Amino acid sequence: MGSLFQLLSNGIVLGTLFGHMAVSPHASSFFTFVTAHTSVELTAVVVAGAAGLRMGWGLIDTQGQSRPASLRREATRALPALGASVVLFVLAAFVEGFISASALPYWAKASVAILSALLIAAFLSLGGRGGNRRSGAG
């Protein structure tokens, strides 16, 4: 429940913030700043949330194991997603610190965002999920 609550809460807060800023006199500055790192950072949030949901589901569907054993099993299975989330957060922080906050023109920041989104999509579509999904490994 915690992961689901956090994902919904983040969605509400970010939606409210972006909606408010869209009609603000500072909209241009805000969107110029967030454009470059948003695709990476939001992907990291979703991946971390999915890992948390997986662990939480292990407490509900124990598959005959004790709850602590089921949680350990699902936490182990969620580790690759958590690791990927950490890498994405570090990358987003780097982009935010050195590109988003820079004086680069908007087209350059938008190019970073598009390239980041394409790289993430390519990673996921070309097998970035790991393991053999049919056999249940990974």
Image (cartoon, helix red, strand yellow):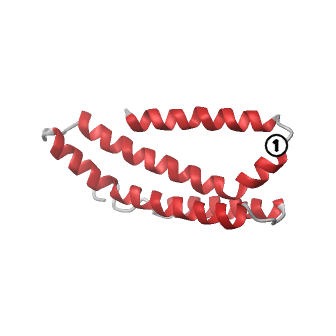
Q: Is residue 60 at all visible to an observer of this figure?
A: yes
Picture quarter with the N terminus? top left
Q: Residue at coordinates 51% horizontally, 48% vertically from top-left? A: 45
Q: Secondary structure at mark 1?
A: helix
Q: Is residue 125 at all visible to an observer of this figure?
A: no
Residue lying furthest right: 25
Three-letter amino acid code of the residue under disc 1: Ala
Quarter of the image where one finds residue 65: top left
Q: Residue at coordinates 81% horizontally, 50% vertically from top-left? A: 29
Q: Position of residue 30 (x, y in %)?
A: 77, 48
Q: Position of residue 138 (x, y in %)?
A: 31, 59
Q: Is residue 36 left or right of residue 132?
A: right
Q: Is residue 104 left or right of residue 125?
A: right
Quarter of the image where one finds residue 20: top right
* Nearer to us in this view, 37 or 54: 37
Q: Is residue 110 left or right of residue 132?
A: right
Q: List the residue tagged with mark 1.
A: 27
Q: Residue at coordinates 79% horizontally, 37% vertically from top-left? A: 22
Q: Position of residue 9 (x, y in %)?
A: 52, 33
Image height of 68 relative to 115, above or below: above
Q: Residue at coordinates 77% horizontally, 38% vertically from top-left? A: 21
Image height of 89 relative to 48, above or below: below
* Nearer to us in this view, 134 or 75: 75
Query: Tag count in the figure?
Result: 1
Q: Position of residue 32 (x, y in %)?
A: 78, 53
Image height of 67 relative to 107, above or below: above
Q: Residues within 10 Å of mark 1 (few under 14, many from 20)?
A: some
